[in-house]
Image (cartoon, helix red, strand yellow):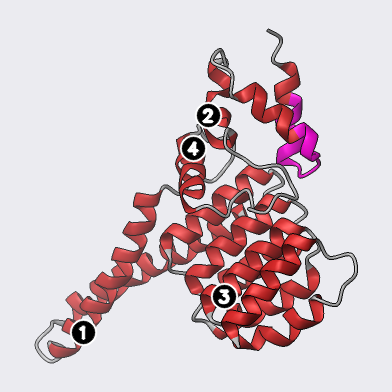
């Protein structure tokens, strides 16, 4: 069988240009038993996707998103693409903890520590902090990649790390608001839920509800607002109910959400 058609459909899907019919055709192709090796990862990743406009979002299911992360991390890195494996992110978090512990012990023993030792320790800590800052910048750079799959990969790294400065969270918010690819926006929503206690994230979800017009994104935002128990979203949700072109499945979810939040 000629698999060029599957590759063309994959390109359109990652670019956010595929129609519901094309996604159904892609799913049918990737569900075959004779999928070639170079498409097997995509088959595992996208084999259970739902057509756009369906009631459930394509990344709304926790198990499917976990499979997305596992498949993306299993891919070989592209040329000049920054790779930050999960174990490295844990090392970053551990380094921060060690710096804090070292600082505490250093204050307890400041009088007895020789000046030369203190200078060496300060230099080592400064080097570690500089390295951490550099790798955070690298994660931000990944979010600006032109490839949707690379941007989804970057979002998943931030989600698994669960530690982000305000600037990185703001980049995620802008990705949720304005990324041209629906799947990337939905991945950003998923990642931002890990920082839902931050006021800037709670406010951003309400703002994004005013911006988005894709029903899958709208559904995931509504679910996120319910999970946050964000009562500040109720006026905006009530206003959305008045929109004539709003899909019925979104109206139904809005009504459910308002009932839970008020």
Answer left or right for 202 relative to 90: right
Q: Is 17 covered by the magenta stretch?
A: yes
User: Between 134 and 245, which is closer to the camera in this rendering?
Assistant: 245
The residue singled out by tag 1 in the image is 104
Asked if marks 1 and 2 touch (Cβ < 8 Å), the reply is: no
The residue singled out by tag 3 in the image is 226
Q: Position of residue 71 (x, y in %)?
A: 49, 37
Q: Residues within 10 Å of mark 1 (few under 14, many from 20)?
A: few
Nearest to the eye among marks 1 and 2: give it: 2
**Region of the chain picked out in magenta, as a range:** 8-22
User: Between 162 and 213, which is closer to the camera in this rendering?
Assistant: 213
For the point 43% across and 69% down, the residue is 163
CA separation in Å, label 1 and label 2: 47 Å
CA separation in Å, label 4 and label 1: 41 Å
CA separation in Å, label 3 and label 4: 29 Å
The residue singled out by tag 4 in the image is 71
For the stretch drawn in magenta, the main secondary structure is helix
Mark found first going from the N terminus, 1 or 2:
2
Tell me, for residue 41, which label it has, or none.
Answer: 2
């Amino acid at each position: 069988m000629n698999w060029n058609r599957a590759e063309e459909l994959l390109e359109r899907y990652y670019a956010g240009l595929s129609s519901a019919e094309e996604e159904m055709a892609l799913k049918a192709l990737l569900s075959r038993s004779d999928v070639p090796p170079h498409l097997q990862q995509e088959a595992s990743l996208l084999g259970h996707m739902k057509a756009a406009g369906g009631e459930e979002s394509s990344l709304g299911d926790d198990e499917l998103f976990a499979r997305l992360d596992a498949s993306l991390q299993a891919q070989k890195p592209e040329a000049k693409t920054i790779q930050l494996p999960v174990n490295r992110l844990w090392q970053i978090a551990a380094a921060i903890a060690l710096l804090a512990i070292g600082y505490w012990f250093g204050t307890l023993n400041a009088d007895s520590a020789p000046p030369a030792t203190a200078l060496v320790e300060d230099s080592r800590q400064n080097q570690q902090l500089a390295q951490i800052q550099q790798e955070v910048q690298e994660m931000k750079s990944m979010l600006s990649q032109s490839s949707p799959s690379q941007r989804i990969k970057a979002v998943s790294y931030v989600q698994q790390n669960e530690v982000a400065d305000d600037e990185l969270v703001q980049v995620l918010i802008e990705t949720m608001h304005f990324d041209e690819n629906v799947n990337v926006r939905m991945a950003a929503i998923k990642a931002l839920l890990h920082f839902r206690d931050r006021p800037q994230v709670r406010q951003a979800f309400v703002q994004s509800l005013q911006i988005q017009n894709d029903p899958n994104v709208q559904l995931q935002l509504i679910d996120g607002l319910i999970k946050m128990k964000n009562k500040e979203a109720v006026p905006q949700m009530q206003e959305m109910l008045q929109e004539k072109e709003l899909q019925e499945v979104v109206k139904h979810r809005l009504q459910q959400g308002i009932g839970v939040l008020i």
